[in-house]
Image (cartoon, rainbow, N blue to C red):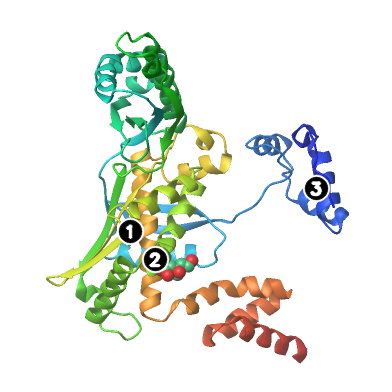
Amino acid sequence: MTKPIEGFSKLSKEDKINWIAEHYTQDSAKSVAILKQYWNEDEKLQKLHDEFIENTITNFYLPLGIAPNFLINNKLYAIPMAIEESSVVAAASKAAKFWQSRGGFKTTVLGTEKVGQVHFMYHGDTEKLIAFFKLVRPRLINSVAPIVKNMEKRGGGIKSIELRNKTSDLDDYFQLHCTFETLDAMGANFINSCLEGFAHCLKEEAQQYAEFTDSEKDIEIVMSILSNYIPNCVVKAEVSCPVSDLKGHHGISAEDFAKKMVRAVNIAKVEPYRAVTHNKGIMNGIDAVVLATGNDFRAIEAGAHAYASKDGRYTSLTHASMDNGIFKFWIEIPLALGTVGGLTTLHPLVKLALEILQNPTAKELMQIVAVAGLAQNFGAVRSLVTTGIQQGHMKMHLLNILNQLGATEEEKIRLVDYFKKHTASHSAVVVAFEELRNKK
Ligand code: MEV
């Protein structure tokens, strides 16, 4: 059995690779070669990537694709998407093209408020804590003035600090529930620094507060951290058109197609098992743009799914209606995104992705990302209620299967052509591939 290792992070990159290959892989020479194959030739660029995280041994590639023809608020965008799933970019592009000739996407930012909390324990008289909080609130704000100065100059900063009594949920548990405007920054560092400042000041001030008993003075800070639940940092994106403009879907009438779409969305509204997959499809589009633009997709995922349950039951993030002959399809989703700071200024591909998006503000990026999610969902639900998902999926997955089988370029061309007229499944591809090989 492999023994634990001490001081792995202090080893050189070369030694880390050798150690991992030797202890955890069958063919260490081959493993080392694979890892090194993904190093960038440009040493400076490689070093930049190495330093994003600890213990870097190589790079992990994802394809970066482009979904063009997104008409958003009358402006045309080509959207960069970083994702491994074969059909996502194709589906987004197809939906973009579809809506481009039907007025495009319309978006509105409904709010940009970020949230952070100082969680603390207070053992004592709640009324006294309330009076204390009123007194120290301005001091809390003053205590972080140097951190907030630049953000305030640009029009952002702390929006509110509220004392919340959570003792009905947990004995002695209180919070400072704080809201922020972080403009073009995602704001995690800014918010966390402010919160830690508030926490420090709160504790110090409590110790000096003459009205408190000794145990009341002893406020215990548990943690200070931003929340990824941001129900007031929300964007809405929508498409709409006369129902009659929806014709042309596999022989289904425009009216029937609209009905099928609305019904499918309504199922995702009432059935959590379906809603999770429905929303997963939305996140296919969202995460791909979030990743390409150097944002934190885990934060976006956590926030989106929490928002999907905000009314007590997990439900669809998109909505659809058909009223007075108009079909409407829309999404409301919380998105805490940044276009400055973090990877956005460091990662050359992220910088380029933002340039392709015309260097958006964070608000503009919220709108673009929401549109990518809506388009993805429209594409997925459209396939589901018409041809079924596998037709498009397998078409896109075909090349992956052919690559797995070791098909040559010529074989790939012939088999892609063959599957334009035949239904692709994994076994059908294997059979067709073997037949083609055996013919030779
Ligand atoms: C697959 O990645 C996403 C879908 O399952 C989404 C959906 O079912 O709506 C196709």
Of callouts 3 and 1, which one flags the residue occurring earlier in the amino acid sequence? 3
Decide: few, some or many residues near mark 2? Use Cα within 10 Å; few <14, some 14-19, many ≥20: many
> Left or right of 179: which side holds 196?
right
Q: What secondary structure is marked by label 2?
A: helix
Q: Residue 309 carries which label?
A: none
To which residue does mark 2 refer?
278
Image region (quadrant) for ligand 1 = bottom left
Residue on which disc 1 sits: 317
Alpha carbon separation for disc pair 2 and 1: 8 Å
Q: Where is residue 398 in the image (x, y as percent from the top left)?
A: 60, 75
Position in image of residue 208 (x %, y %): 37, 8
The answer to whether 30 appears left or right of 118 in the picture is right
Amino acid type, callout 2: His
Q: Does the residue labelled 2 lie within 8 Å of ligand 1?
A: yes
- Is residue 156 visible to the viewer in this orientation of the structure? no
Three-letter residue code for mark 1: Leu
Secondary structure of the residue carrying numbered label 1: loop
Q: Is mark 3 on a helix, strand or loop?
A: helix
Q: Badge 3: few (under 14), some or many (20 or more) residues near its Cα, within 10 Å?
A: some
First in sequence: mark 2 vs mark 3 = 3
Q: Vertically, is 105 above or below 166?
A: below
User: What kind of residue is marked 3?
Assistant: Ile
Residues at marks 2 and 3, CA–CA distance in whole angstroms? 39 Å
Q: Where residue 212 appears, x then y in whole percent?
A: 33, 14
- The answer to which of 29 and 226 lies nearer the viewer is 226
Q: Give residue 80's position: percent from left, percent from top.
A: 48, 52
**Gap between marks 3 and 1 measured at Cα:** 42 Å
